[in-house]
Image: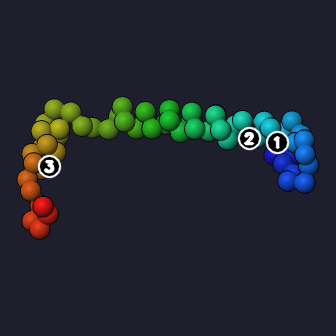
Amino acid sequence: SGYDAQLLIQPASALLGLRLLMSAIPIAALALAFVFIFYYPLSGERLKAVEAEMSVPIKGMP
């Protein structure tokens, strides 16, 4: 990325690398998470089964 800790003014390539790390990569990760959430099979009968399982108390838990 061109980052040099000894320099007071960083080169443009270092600034671009930091901008990508702070914006483009998190946006891409968020978009990928939305894709996984959209295609996760949790509706209809599957949702009812999960809700029923979650309503059963776990032995030893308050």
- Which of marks 3 and 1 precedes in the sequence? 1
Numbered tag placed on residue 18 in the rendering: 2
User: Within 10 angstroms of label 1, few (less than 14), some, or many (20 or more) residues?
Assistant: some
Task: Inspect the image, locate mark 2, and give the three-letter code of the amino acid beneath it.
Answer: Leu
Outermost residue on the front side: it is 8
- 43 sits left or right of 17 in the view: left
List the residue tagged with mark 3. 54
Q: Are marks 1 and 2 in contact (CB under 8 Å)?
A: yes
Q: Is residue 33 above or below residue 6?
A: above
Outermost residue on the bottom side: it is 60
- 58 sits left or right of 37 in the view: left
In front of the other: 60 or 54: 60
> Which residue is found at the position 8% from the left and 53% from the top?
56
> Which residue is found at the position 36% from the left and 31% from the top?
38
User: Within 10 angstroms of label 2, few (less than 14), some, or many (20 or more) residues?
Assistant: some
All told, the count of numbered labels is 3
What is the secondary structure assignment of the residue under circle 2? helix
Q: Which quadrant of the figure has residue 13?
A: top right
Location of the C terminus (image quadrant): bottom left
Task: Inspect the image, locate mark 1, and give the three-letter code of the amino acid beneath it.
Answer: Ala
- 24 sits left or right of 56 in the view: right
In front of the other: 39 or 26: 26
Q: Which quadrant of the figure has residue 42?
A: top left
- Which of marks 3 and 2 precedes in the sequence? 2
Numbered tag placed on residue 14 in the rendering: 1
Task: Inspect the image, locate mark 3, and give the three-letter code of the amino acid beneath it.
Answer: Met
- 9 sits left or right of 58 in the view: right
> Which residue is found at the position 17% from the left and 38% from the top?
47
Q: CA distance from mark 1 to mark 3?
A: 49 Å
What is the secondary structure assignment of the residue under circle 3? helix
